[in-house]
C-alpha cells in the first residue's frame, strides 16, 4: 500500500471504560442496514446497498441531520434519493466516448452495489464521550456483471463512517489492485436537512471558480460572501482553498462541512420543476427542506497506478 502524508485524521481515543455504543444489523437481503447508537443517544444508519448513510441523528438522537426522500428506494432496486450516496468511479453523466468510464451509468456503480460490512470499532475519550467507527468494503468481485464489463479494472474500496456526539466522519479509501492504472472521480452526495431553504446561506466559497450546470456548464466566480439558494442550483466549486464550507439558516450556524484531501464541492438543489419531475423525490416541495453540499474530487480525474491508494473524505459537524 502506498501511504500519503496527509491522510484523513482518524477520530480515535483511548479504549472505552464505560457503556459502549450499540451496533446492530437490521433486516436482511437488499434492505439490510447497520445501525449504530451512542450511549448518549446519537445514531447513524447505513444501508448496505450502496453503503448509503440514510440517517444521522445528533442532540441525543432528537435531531435528524440528513434529508431522505419519502419515496427513496431502500430495497436495492435503485440508488437512494437522499442521505449520503457514494459516487464512484464517475461523477454525473460519464464522458460520451473515449474514456474507460464512458459505458457506466450516471454516478457510477458504488451507490448501486451491495457493500460488505467489515466490522466496528468503538472508543471513549478522556471526557467520557464515545465514538464508533463502521467499516464497509467493495471490490471488483462485488459489483454486477454489467458494471464489471463496463469498467473491467481491479479495485478495492473501504468506506469508514465514524459517529461522535456532534459529528459524522465519512472517508473513502480507493486502492488499485490490478496491473493497469485507472482514472476515477469520487463524491459524497450529502443531502443536508434544513427547515427553510429560503433562509439558508452557504459560506466559505468566496472567490472560488465554479461550473454552473444550470447555465450550460459555463464557468463563473463566486462573487458574494454567502451563497443563497433562490432557484435550481447545480454548481461544481473547484479547487477550494479552505477546508470548511458552512451552512447557516436565518444567520444561525447549522453545519460545518470539512473536506479532507478533497478540493471540490458541489452545491445542488433541484427546486420546483426538477423536484416534481423526479419520480423518487417526495414530497414535491421537499426541496425546501434540503440542500446538497457534496465534497469530492470531480474536476478532472484522479489517477492510480498499480498498488497505489487514494483516500479522502469529510467531517460534518452539527452546530445545532
Image (spheres, rainbow, N blue to C red):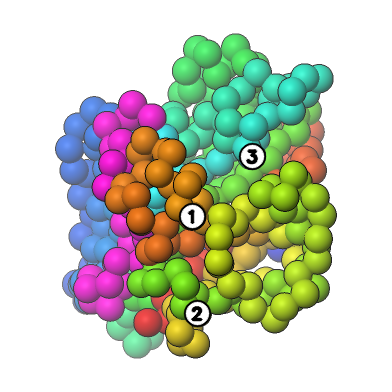
Q: Residue at x 45, y 84 (%)?
A: 250
Looking at the rendered structure, the secondary structure element under dot 3 is: loop
Label 3 – label 2 distance at C-alpha: 27 Å
Q: Nearer the viewer, residue 9 or 51?
A: 51
**Circle 3 or circle 2, nearest the eye:** 2
Q: Which residues are magenta?
A: 55-78
Callout 3: 10 Å neighbours few (<14), some, many (20+)?
many
- Marked residue nearer the N-terminal end (3 or 2): 3
Which quadrant would the C terminus be assigned to in this image? bottom left
Whole-percent x and y of residue 159? 49, 47
Whole-percent x and y of residue 297? 70, 50
Quarter of the figure with residue 306: top right
Q: Residue at x 62, y 65 (%)?
A: 259
Q: Which residue is mark 1?
A: 271
Q: Which mark is residue 248?
A: 2
Label 2 – label 1 distance at C-alpha: 19 Å
Residue 73, compared with residue 286, is above or below; it is above
Whole-percent x and y of residue 263? 72, 59
Looking at the rendered structure, the secondary structure element under dot 2 is: strand
**Circle 3 or circle 1, nearest the eye:** 1
Residue 314, compared with residue 310, is above or below; it is below
Q: Is residue 133 visible?
A: no
Q: Which mark is residue 91?
A: 3
Amino acid at each position: 500500500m502506498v501511504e500519503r502524508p496527509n491522510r484523513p485524521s482518524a477520530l480515535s481515543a483511548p479504549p472505552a471504560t464505560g457503556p459502549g455504543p450499540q451496533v446492530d444489523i437490521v433486516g436482511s437481503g437488499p434492505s439490510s442496514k447497520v445501525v449504530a447508537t451512542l450511549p448518549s443517544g446519537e445514531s447513524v444508519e447505513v444501508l448496505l446497498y450502496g453503503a448509503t448513510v440514510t440517517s444521522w441523528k445528533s442532540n441525543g438522537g432528537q435531531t435528524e441531520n440528513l434529508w431522505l426522500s419519502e419515496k427513496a428506494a431502500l430495497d436495492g432496486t435503485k440508488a437512494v434519493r437522499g442521505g449520503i450516496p457514494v459516487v464512484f468511479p464517475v461523477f454525473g453523466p460519464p464522458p460520451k466516448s473515449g474514456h474507460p468510464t464512458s459505458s457506466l451509468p450516471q454516478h457510477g456503480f458504488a451507490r448501486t452495489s451491495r457493500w460488505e460490512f467489515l466490522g466496528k470499532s468503538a472508543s471513549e475519550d478522556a471526557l467520557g464521550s464515545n465514538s464508533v467507527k463502521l467499516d464497509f468494503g467493495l471490490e471488483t468481485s462485488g459489483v454486477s456483471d454489467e458494471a464489471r464489463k463496463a469498467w473491467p479494472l481491479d479495485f478495492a474500496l473501504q468506506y469508514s463512517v465514524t459517529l461522535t456526539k456532534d459529528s459524522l466522519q465519512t472517508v473513502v479509501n480507493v486502492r488499485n489492485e490490478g496491473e493497469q492504472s485507472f482514472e476515477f472521480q469520487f463524491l459524497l452526495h450529502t443531502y443536508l436537512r434544513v427547515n427553510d431553504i429560503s433562509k439558508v446561506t452557504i459560506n466559505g466559497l468566496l472567490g472560488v471558480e465554479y461550473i454552473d450546470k444550470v447555465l450550460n456548464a459555463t464557468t463563473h466566480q463566486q462573487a458574494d460572501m454567502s451563497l443563497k439558494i433562490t432557484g435550481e442550483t447545480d454548481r461544481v466549486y473547484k479547487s477550494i482553498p479552505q477546508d470548511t464550507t458552512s451552512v447557516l439558516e436565518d444567520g444561525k450556524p447549522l453545519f460545518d462541512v470539512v473536506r479532507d484531501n478533497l478540493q471540490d464541492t458541489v452545491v445542488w438543489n433541484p427546486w420546483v420543476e426538477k423536484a416534481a419531475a423526479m419520480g423518487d423525490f417526495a414530497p414535491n416541495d421537499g426541496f425546501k427542506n434540503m440542500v446538497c453540499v457534496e465534497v469530492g474530487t470531480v474536476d478532472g480525474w484522479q489517477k492510480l497506478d498499480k498498488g497505489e491508494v487514494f483516500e479522502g473524505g469529510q467531517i460534518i459537524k452539527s452546530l445545532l
